[in-house]
């Protein structure tokens, strides 16, 4: 269908040194010298070139290399990929180019070369600075490896993000708090805090059903999120999304694109593409349509996603959406009365209760549009 230009590009690299106990992503543990990786990267290069020829990359503003572990595939393959990007679209300093990496695969040569090839934001999968927790998660790195990787990355990058996991069974408040404090001491510019979710088809799920692992506790996870919020805000970080904190100027533009209805192109196995025009929004994954939304559903989704962000939803967007969603204003007023959101500075914004009870908040908004999401 005719569609708005893609403004964000995601490249999926589905390879890791090992699969973590909680991982249900489209990844595989494979030897680093496997020809399977070479074949995959060659196909990804061809896809990038083809999309460039079709004129689909001319408006790209953010790029994200995710996985899996992109850093695991090595410099020669990454160089081929990044060089192809530089020939296929505008890869200038104002274009945010993020790459995920795990601490065990970061070294000085990798940092120097990917920075020279256009990567300007590094996202490190740390999860914890507690070695016992890392062992429980099945991570391939130690706390010392994570610290070394951050210090190494700082030789080139000032835009460094890390992930930390909250509410892990057996993780004490002190362990979690200590990890947040260590991240602050190391001087990273962006921290994402994710409550652990135990998904089916993971080792954690098998341990859970066999009684070898306790289930996650919503109250503990909420408490950990509150610990993180207090510590991070005390150190000048701004919470700009339900799970994301950044120093001023370091919010992830690529992730914000997902939450603000910006069309994005995904290349590689399991990578999702979102394409839209004024009346229709579709998501496509591995050649299959996974979402097909009409105009009313698009507005409901935009309002819902806006409630994930501290900026909230503007009065202007609510006014537009209300033409398609007649009960929107009534529902927002009810959510204010019940403490989930507030209205200030011409916008509807989530409260602390809204952050912590997001599923209830988001569900009520999505229910305003008829049909299935």
Image (cartoon, rainbow, N blue to C red):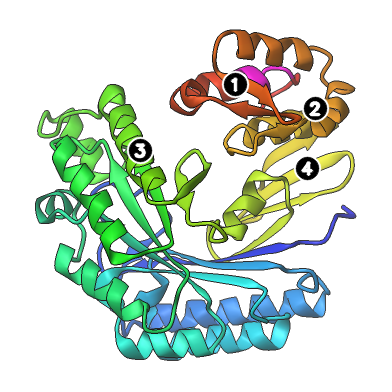
Nearer the observer: mark 2 or 4; the answer is 2
> Crowding at label 2, few (<14), some or many (≥20) Cα neighbours within 10 Å?
many
Camera-side residue of 346 and 174 = 346
Which element carries disc 1, helix, strand or loop?
Answer: strand
Query: Which residue does the numbered mark 3 point to in the structure image?
Result: 230
Q: Are marks 1 and 3 in contact (CB under 8 Å)?
A: no
Q: Residue 281 carries which label?
A: 4
Q: Which of marks 2 and 4 is nearer the N terminus?
A: 4
Q: Earlier in the sequence, mark 4 or mark 1?
A: 4
Nearer the observer: mark 4 or 1; the answer is 1
Q: Quadrant of the C terminus?
A: top right
| Region in magenta | 364-368
In the image, what residue occupies the spot 69% across and 88% down?
Answer: 87
Which element carries disc 2, helix, strand or loop?
Answer: helix
In the image, what residue occupies the spot 33% across and 61% down?
Answer: 125
Which element carries disc 4, helix, strand or loop?
Answer: strand
Q: Is residue 286 above or below residue 30?
A: above
């Amino acid at each position: 269908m005719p569609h708005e230009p893609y403004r964000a590009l995601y490249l999926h690299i589905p390879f890791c040194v090992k699969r973590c106990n909680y991982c249900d992503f489209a990844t595989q543990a494979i030897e680093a010298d496997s020809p399977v990786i070479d074949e995959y990267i060659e196909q990804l290069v061809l896809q990038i070139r083809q999309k460039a020829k079709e004129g689909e990359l001319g408006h790209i503003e953010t790029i994200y290399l995710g996985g899996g572990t992109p850093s695991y595939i090595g410099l020669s393959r990454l160089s081929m990929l990044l060089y192809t990007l530089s020939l296929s679209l505008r890869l200038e300093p104002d274009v945010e180019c993020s790459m995920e990496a795990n601490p065990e695969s970061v070294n000085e040569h990798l940092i120097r070369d990917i920075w020279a090839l256009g990567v300007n934001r590094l996202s490190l999968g740390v999860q914890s600075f507690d070695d016992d927790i890392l062992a429980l998660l099945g991570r391939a790195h130690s706390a010392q490896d994570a610290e070394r990787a951050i210090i190494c990355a700082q030789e080139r990058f000032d835009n460094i993000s890390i992930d930390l996991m909250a509410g892990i069974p057996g993780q004490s408040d002190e362990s979690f708090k200590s990890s947040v404090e260590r991240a602050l001491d190391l001087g990273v510019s962006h921290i994402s805090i994710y409550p652990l979710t135990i998904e089916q088809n993971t080792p954690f799920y098998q341990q859970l059903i066999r009684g070898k692992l306790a289930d996650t506790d919503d109250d503990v996870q909420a408490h950990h999120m509150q610990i993180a919020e207090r510590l991070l805000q005390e150190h000048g970080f701004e919470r700009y999304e339900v799970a994301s904190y950044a120093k001023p100027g370091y919010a992830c533009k690529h992730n914000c694109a997902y939450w603000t209805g910006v069309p994005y192109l995904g290349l590689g196995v399991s990578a999702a593409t979102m394409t839209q025009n004024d009346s229709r929004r579709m998501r496509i994954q591995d050649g299959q349509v996974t979402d097909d939304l009409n105009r009313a559903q698009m507005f409901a989704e935009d309002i819902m996603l806006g409630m994930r962000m501290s900026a909230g939803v503007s009065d202007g967007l609510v006014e537009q959406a209300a033409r398609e969603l007649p009960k929107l204003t009534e529902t927002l007023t009810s959510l204010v009365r019940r403490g989930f959101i507030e209205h200030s500075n011409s916008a509807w914004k989530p409260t602390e209760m809204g952050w912590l009870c997001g599923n209830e908040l988001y569900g009520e908004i999505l229910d305003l549009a008829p049909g299935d999401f």
